[in-house]
Amino acid sequence: MRGRAVILETPGRISPFGDPCREALFTDEPIAATQDRAFGEVLKFEVVRAATPQEAAARVKDAPANKPVILLLDRIYVSEKAATDFLKATRKAPRPAALALSMNASVEYTLPLQAVLQKDELVVHHVVRVDGAELPAPGDDPVAWMDQVVAAATPVDVPKRELVAQVPLPTIGEGEKRTLRYPVTSTVVVSVEHWVHVLWLNQIAFGIRWMELLRRKPLWGIWRALTAFSLNRHRLLDRLVWRGRKSDVHPSAYVSASILGMGVTVGANATVRNCVIGDGAVIQDHAVLLNCVVGKDALITTNTFLVSSVVYPEATVGNYKLQVSLIGRGAFVNAWASFVDAKFVGHVKVEKDGALVDSGRAFLGSVIGHRAKMAAKVLVQPGREIPNDTVVVMRPDEVIRVVPEGLRPGTPLVRDRGTLVPLGQESA
């Protein structure tokens, strides 16, 4: 054992799912599993989970002497690269030492609504190296106690590299040119407290997962790099594809810069770009997926257009177009169930702690709860939460139920309280 990671549980849950924050989805697993891998498998630490601050303090105190001890909250996603570099950066730092990242594109991308300390252009997270340090007396509130630990710690700026793509966004109301700074990096730390964090973290997942894949399979990565060499950017991206065993990609499909799990099916003329697709997921014919995460055994039906969205396992999406939205486990979104994904003026507001707050985004869809069903002709304003197990259908008076006999051919007809009538004869 090289050290110990003490992970303190928090009471927070991700609305509308009701899942504890540690169970929030990152590509194909909960963030609790990413913590176990980053600290347990990569750093070779003993990973200990504590239910209370008192238990966490005790596990810090009884850790083996002369070994590093890292204390963090269970809602913190820490990439393998960030965990490794934090350990290196704190070797000679005074204790306690808190993980900090300088403000840049990848930090800004997920920062709104995170309860973190910002200090001197640094974002300081609830990840602290505490071996040899005196900790504050633990209280009953785990977050409040960790706030005290962080406040007493020396921020350590973890070095990072990133590429930033300037993604043009449509000008929809205020007349100014808009661009989204999309980051590609494997050094990422996010306090996952809200459904928007699940969405934004997964939107930048490909860069994280790809670098982790290369570190696990270095010879394969060298071979792909050598065979991918090209001055043509598109040919290069075509080589940045990992296909799991028994994946079935139709010869006419286009897949680039993506990770496909085991048993994934991609249909004829489908497009999958900058995506992470979970085991057993099915992408049917002519579907287009750009910058998405699709969970295990999910189904994306024919002709679906999905952009910068996240689909939990076992969900079905049959929408003709869905952007920047989050779909819960086992949910069903039908064609014509439309999600407004932009605000003409200002930012989209989302629910947090019983109030509507600024998300910091002008382009943002909504979240659909686990097992919820959205039927045809449903329109959802941006930033809204549809609860678990909800069934939303169209208004009955929008359905044509009665087609009278004797309608004259060529006469314009309209729906009037469920009945077809000649234009101009509808009820007042």
Image: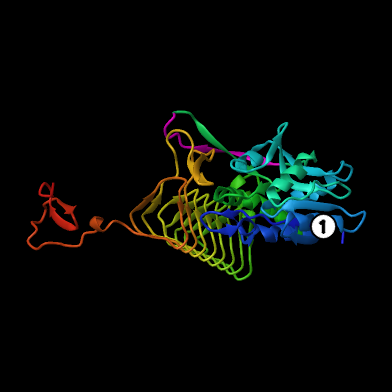
Left or right of 136? Residue 401 is left
Question: Amino acid type of disc 1?
Answer: Ala
The residue that disc 1 covers is: 58
Residue furthest to the bottom in view is: 246
Q: Position of residue 181 (x, y in %)?
A: 59, 38
Q: Please provide percent x and percent y for residue 25.
A: 60, 58
Q: Is residue 224 above or below residue 148?
A: below
User: 25 or 70: which is nearer to us?
Assistant: 70
Is residue 221 visible to us here? no
Residue that appears at 63% across and 69% down: 245
Horizontal and vertical percent for residue 242?
64, 60
Dividing the picture into quadrants, the one containing residue 244 is: bottom right
Residue 166 colored in magenta in the image? yes
322 lies above or below 373: above
- Residue 373: say if magenta: no
**Residue shown at the point (63%, 52%) measured from the top left:** 206
Query: What colouring style does the render use?
Result: rainbow
Q: Is residue 361 above or below residue 74?
A: above
Q: What range of the chain is rendered magenta?
A: 162-174
Determine whether, in the image, residue 92 is placed left or right of residue 417.
right
Q: Is residue 7 left or right of residue 357?
A: right
Q: Position of residue 267 (x, y in %)?
A: 49, 64
Name the quadrant of the N terminus: bottom right
- Residue furthest to the right: 66
- Numbered disc total: 1
